[in-house]
Structure formats: structure tokens, C-alpha cells
Image: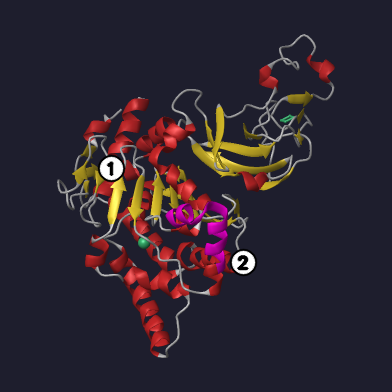
Amino acid sequence: MQPISELIRPDSVHKKIYTDQEIFDREIENIWEKIWVYCGHESQVKNQGDFYTLQIGRQPMVMVRGADDNIHVLYNRCPHRGVQLCGARSGNTGSTFVCSYHAWTFHLDGQIKKIPMVEGYAGTKMNYENPNCSVKTAARVDSYRGFVFASLSPDGESLEEFLGESKIAFDDMCDRSPEGEVEVVPVCHRVIQHSNWKFFMENQLDALHPSVTHQSTGVAASRVERSIQEKGETPPLYYHYLSTFASTFDQWDAVQTINFPKGHGILAGFMGLRPDDSDTQEYVASMYKAYGEKLAEEYLQRNIHHVLVYPYLSVQSPLQQMRVLRPIAPNKTLSEIWHFRLKGVSPAIYRRSLWYYNLVNSPSTMINADDLENWTKGQWGLESDGHDWVSFHRDFGRDTVTDDGTTYSNNGMSEAVMRSQSAAWATYMENGE
Ligand code: FES
Ligand SMILES: [Fe+2]
């Protein structure tokens, strides 16, 4: 087994960590099947018996609202002969799970309820008291502000410790609602990316790429925006979502990334979502009423553009966007693209999240499509014998590192983001082995 130290340098990583099956298998064991993995939002399973299936590492799981109103996360596997209990992605299973093969029946928390013709097991180990007759549950389940996570490992840090500084992603999302909560919009784009999951995570705070990768879209949107302004009219906010991608290198270098020791990161930057119109005025008034002016302004003026929960969540909290990665193979990654509705706001305010969802994050936009193409071509390049090492040298040694190990980039386009993520990756891998 190749030592991790041979694959990581402070300023670069070996291509194998993106392409090698053996490394990928070690990642699944040491990272994905140990850490807290996002399952879904509690509003996806509102009623008893509501379920939603998902993948944690290699394990097919089901999140379900129990008879006790708690959310349980179970292995989607019948204890009898292994058949998956839920075949649909989501639905309501009633008050029990009934296996489609031989009708073993389970309570919503996975406990065995009935084995048909149980007398056939007389004298064997299979009886109602044997835990092996119940559905296996995730070792730990917890939630933060309505976002449900599970860990397949009984030991390790708590969910709040795992999230650490990245908790702000969920706080920022929910605090922007006068009710302090969001609910899921039950439409999820599922995209198979033909590239290693690290490409996506590195890209999210990569301020060097937008002016190149997204230049054509940004420039086209800027032209339309200007022509509307020349007519003396105010361009709709959604043009701004796209034109901002055409910012200059200097503008991108002026932003800051904050990179935490566990790989989480924040791209600081105020998103400018407060046009002076009656919808916004009504929304701001409802926030003042809920929180008082001072606190409401603190929430509305947070200097956050993007938060990464390493190694698998990309959250654009000011617009309630969240992308979730589930790695499938070294060169294959499922991404789930979700967005949320702020509770207690008008449809006009919600529409701003929907625009962003459709114009920037959906797989059919010109923004996401250009990223996807780069990552696929990146995977092909790293699978070649062109070079062995991937460079993260930009602004190396020029970031500010505090005593607690947090790295503040002094230039927005610093590859501090990638250096921080690869260091966190090495720590996970080495601790697991
Ligand atoms: S496999 Fe589920 S009841 Fe037999
Ligand atoms: Fe991009």
C-alpha cells in the first residue's frame, strides 16, 4: 500500500489521487464511510413513513420519518436475504417496511415486526430478539438546523465538531428567513460528473477560473445588461448573476478565501442581493420585525459568497443553493443539486433562488456546463502520462496562516484552497490507516 506522504507535497499532489482505484477504495473507507455525510433535509420526510434513499460511501441507505417522529437512517437491505427494502427513490411506506421478497416486516426504526411463518425458524438463531433480524441502522444520526447527517462510524467527533466553521453555511441560509428556517424545494438535478470528486471541490473556490471558463457567458450577459441600462431601465437581477462571471482578474484577486484546517472554506464576498424595489423592501421589513434592525442587518450583510463543507458540500447560502457530492468511482461522481425556500418570504424573493438554480447551477446552464467540460478534460489529462504532478503553486508562501492553522489568502486567486484541501485529505487518509 503506497504511503500517502509519497502522493502529497505542500505545493502539489500526485495525479494518482484522482485516478487510482486503490486510492479511491481507501478514500471510501477512511473518509466517506466514517465522517458525517449529508442525508437530506428534514422537510424531505415530513410525515411518518416518508422515506428518501441515498448513498453513503458504498452503502445504499434510506432516511425515514419514524413513528416517534424522529428521523432514522437505515441500510436499505433486508436482513433476511438482502433485498433492498425501498426500490423507489422516495415515497411513503406507511407504518412499516415490508420486504417485497418474503414479506418480513419492519417498524420504521428498522426493528423487526413480523417474520411470516416464524415457526419455520424454531431451534435456529433467527428470532425476534436477534438484532440480526432487524434492519441495520447508521451508527449515528444528527441534524443541524434541519439538515440531517449520518455517520457509519460509532466513534469520532460530533456533527457540530465535524462541521466546525462551516456551520455558518446553514446558519446563513436559515437566518435569512424571518422564521429562521428553510424547506427543500423537492426538485433535484442529479448529474454524473465524469471526473474525480476533488475537481469539483477545488473548483468551487477557484477564483482564477471564472474570467476564463465563464468569460463568454459573462460578457454576453454584461452586454445585455448595459443595453437595458442605456434605455434608462433597470436590468433584472438575474443578468447580474451571469455578468459577474466576467469580472477582471484584478477583481477576482481582490476577494478572499478563508481555508480551515479540516478543508472547509469560505469565499468572502457580498452578493449584492438587495435591489431597491418593493419586494426587497417588504422582505427587509419582515426581517426587521423578526429580529430587530441590528441583527437583521447583520444577517443580510454577511460577507459570504460560498461555503464549502469538506469534502462534499458546496453551499451558496445567500441564495439557498447546495450541491452534494457522492463519489462513485475515481472518474465518476454523482452531484445532487438542491435549492431551498426561505420560510415566510414572498414568491418574488424565492424566485431569486430559483433563477440562480436554473441559470448558474443547473446542468443545462452555460456556467455549469463549462465547468463540467473542464473537469472531464482534467480527468482525461491526469489519466495520461503527460506529467505526474498537479500544480498548486500559485501564491505559495504568500498567504496568511494564523496560529490555529487557518489560511487567509492575500490574493483571491491563490491556490491556498487546493493546498488546504489536499492537506486535509492527507490527514483523513493517514488517520484512517
Ligand atoms: S429477502 Fe427480505 S424477506 Fe426475504
Ligand atoms: Fe466555474
Rendered image quadrant of residue 63: top right
Residue 365 placed where, x, y %? 46, 68
Q: Residue at x 70, y 35 (%)?
A: 69
Is 56 covered by the magenta stretch? no
Query: What secondary structure is the magenta-colored segment mainly?
Result: helix
Is the distance from the Cβ of mark 1 to the nearest ligand 2 atom less than 8 Å?
no
Q: Is residue 128 above or below residue 56?
A: above
Relative side of 85 to 320, left or right: right
Is the distance from the Cβ of mark 2 to the nearest ligand 2 atom less than 8 Å?
no
**Ligand 2 positioned in quadrant:** bottom left
Q: Which numbered dot is residue 420? A: 1
Residue 120 placed where, x, y %? 82, 17
Rendered image quadrant of residue 243: bottom left
Helix or strand or loop: what does disc 2 sit on? helix
The region drawn magenta spans 282-298
Q: Residue at x 52, y 29 (%)?
A: 152
Indicate the amino acid at tag 1: Ser
Identify the residue under disc 2: 347
Residue 296 placed where, x, y %? 48, 55
Relative side of 131 to 372, left or right: right
Q: Residue furthest left?
A: 397
